[in-house]
Image (spheres, rainbow, N blue to C red):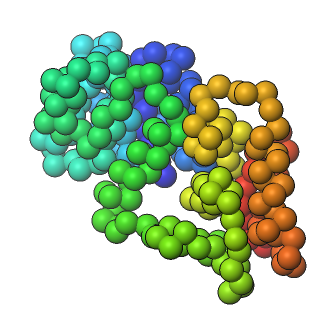
């Protein structure tokens, strides 16, 4: 996806932009309201992550109202420290599609942005994931490869689901800690390596072609080798 991040806080912007790029997305960044409005109105994006309070004389609500006034329906996630109910309501009424307050977990931000983009494209809810001959059913909680049922523990299922939702993309350790274990810090353990190894024993070892790959110094990726 092509995503615009409008955020003036350098630390927050760097964290979000880096995480989105690690997840395989193309990202543009504006650190003030004027540049943010110009980019959002003049270029095509799959989603916009928008701060409420911005320098440059134009705040997030003004950007939203301008875009909606131009019939621009790009999905917008408001990312703001303004957490009061009245403020969230103002943001949504101005045209925001979702509202996430700071501080936040990157895994949740990524999931919300990708959900908004799918909704914007009119896709229905995803109930099955597939990579090559590997299939994961989110409703029945069943996993099959080449028609063979694979029994997974709940954590293994969540890990595989997360990897398959990001098929073809590098999934970092930080993303896995937040998205699968709900850790917002590094516990300094090998918990990820242990679970990935167990998952490989069930998903890859009995079959001729591996699907779970290690990306050196980066993380993991699920993909079909060419």
Q: Considering depth in this image, is 141 or 135 the residue closer to the camera?
A: 141
Q: Residue at x 46, y 15 (%)?
A: 9
At 23% from the left and 20% from the top, the residue drawn is 84
Residue 179 screen position, x and y as percent: 57, 43
Task: Find the residue positioned furthest to the bottom.
Answer: 147
**Residue at point 43% right, 33% down?**
5
Corner quadrant of residue 166: bottom right
Q: Quadrant of residue 77?
A: top left
| Viewer can see residue 35 | no
Q: Position of residue 159 (x, y in %)?
A: 65, 54
Q: Residue at x 86, y 76 (%)?
A: 206
Q: Is residue 139 above or below residue 208?
A: above
Left or right? Give the position of 35 relative to 12: left
| 51 lies left or right of 188 | left
Q: Quadrant of the C terminus?
A: bottom right
Residue 16 appears in the rendering: yes
In the image shown, does 58 or 156 lie closer to the viewer? 156
Indicate the quadrant where residue 30 lies.
top left
Is residue 88 depicted above or below 112 in this figure?
Answer: above
């Amino acid at each position: 996806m092509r995503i615009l991040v409008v955020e003036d806080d350098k630390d927050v912007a760097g964290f979000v932009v880096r995480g989105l790029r690690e997840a395989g997305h193309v990202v543009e960044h504006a650190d003030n309201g004027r540049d943010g409005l110009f980019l959002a109105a003049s270029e095509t994006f799959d989603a916009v992550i928008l701060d409420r309070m911005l320098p440059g004389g134009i705040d997030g609500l003004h950007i939203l109202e301008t875009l909606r006034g131009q019939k621009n329906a790009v999905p917008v996630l408001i990312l703001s420290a303004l957490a009061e109910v009245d403020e969230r309501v103002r943001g949504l009424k101005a045209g925001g599609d979702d509202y996430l307050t700071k501080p936040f977990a990157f895994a949740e931000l990524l999931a919300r942005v990708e959900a908004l983009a799918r909704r914007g494209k009119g896709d229905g809810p995803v109930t099955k994931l597939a990579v090559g001959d590997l299939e994961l059913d989110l409703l029945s909680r069943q996993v099959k490869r080449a028609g063979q049922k694979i029994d997974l523990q709940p954590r293994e299922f969540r890990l595989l689901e997360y990897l398959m939702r990001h098929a073809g993309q590098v999934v970092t350790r930080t993303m896995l800690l937040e998205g699968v274990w709900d850790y917002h810090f590094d516990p300094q353990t090998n918990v990820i390596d242990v679970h990935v190894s167990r998952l490989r024993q069930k998903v890859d070892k009995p079959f001729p072609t591996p699907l779970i790959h290690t990306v050196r110094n980066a993380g993991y990726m699920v993909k079909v080798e060419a």
